[in-house]
Amino acid sequence: MKFNSTPIAGLYLIEPKVFGDSRGYFFESFQQAEFEQNIGKVEFVQDNESKSGYGVLRGLHFQRPPHSQAKLVRCIVGSILDVVVDLRKDSPTFKQHYSVELSADNKLQLFIPRGFAHGFVVQSEEAIFSYKVDNLYSPTHDGGIRYDDPEFAIDWKLSKEEIKLSAKDQELPMVSQLEIPDFI
């Protein structure tokens, strides 16, 4: 695997080494020792998966301490635009965002450390999104920020008319209305 740093410290784009032939392909999507050597010690405790149709936008979500989560995310069917916002107050990239296309074709993964809001929008007819987390979900520590917050000016690559949100995501606050926690 190739671990590529991004403009935001701690955030890594991971390219697997894919072995393919006429039968299909094989690659390692995760290998603990290699991960620790390149990123550090992270103990993933749960794998999650979601299926969504074109235009579904999930996010921007985060978990407040002590239930904040690091994630290793990938798209195993279809294509998504994956977006993260740095909410670490002591970071030089505080409130900056990063986006990348993750797809079944490119097989890229994104490692997101604790202290980020995360979301994605489906660009293909459907997508299956898979991710590992290093802490269990806690409904009482759930947080989020509006996907269209003008402070971030995120280009989701779809028109507002194409975007489909859950009722919960429609009610998320703007970052200016949010008390951002201290992530540790």
Image (cartoon, grey):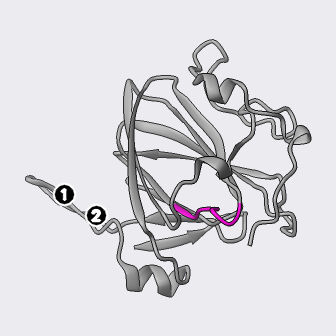
Q: Residue 25 carries which label?
A: 1
Q: In which quarter of the image is the C terminus?
A: bottom right
- As drawn, 104 above or below 28: above
Q: Residue furthest top?
A: 161
Q: What element carries label 1?
A: strand
Classified by dominant secondary structure, the portion drawn in magenta counts as loop
Q: Is residue 38 left or right of residue 167?
A: left
- As drawn, 28 above or below 41: above
> Counting other residues with Cα less than 10 Å from the Cα at mark 2, is it few (<14), some (14-19), or many (20 or more)?
some
Where residue 63 appears, as percent x and y from the top left, is 65, 54
Q: In this view, does 154 lie to the left or right of 14?
A: right
Q: In this view, does 2 lie to the left or right of 17?
A: right
Q: Could you give the CA–CA distance between mark 1 and mark 2, rounded to whole angstroms?
A: 7 Å
Q: In which quarter of the image is residue 78?
A: top left
The disc labelled 1 sits on which kind of residue? Tyr
Are circles 1 and 2 on residues that touch, CB within 8 Å? yes
Q: Is residue 145 left or right of residue 1?
A: right
Q: In which quarter of the image is the N terminus?
A: bottom left
Q: Name the residue under label 2.
A: 18
Q: Which of marks 1 and 2 is nearer the N terminus?
A: 2
Question: In front: 26, or 56?
Answer: 56
Q: Quadrant of residue 52?
A: top left
Where residue 86 appears, as percent x and y from the top left, is 75, 57
Where residue 67 appears, as percent x and y from the top left, is 63, 62
Q: Which residue lies furthest to the left in this view?
A: 23
The disc labelled 2 sits on which kind of residue? Val
Where residue 85 appears, as percent x and y from the top left, is 73, 51
- As drawn, 124 above or below 162: below
Q: What stretch is highlighted in magenta?
A: 65-71
- The answer to whether residue 29 is magenta is no
Q: Residue at x 45, y 70 (%)?
A: 44
Q: Residue at x 61, y 22 (%)?
A: 167
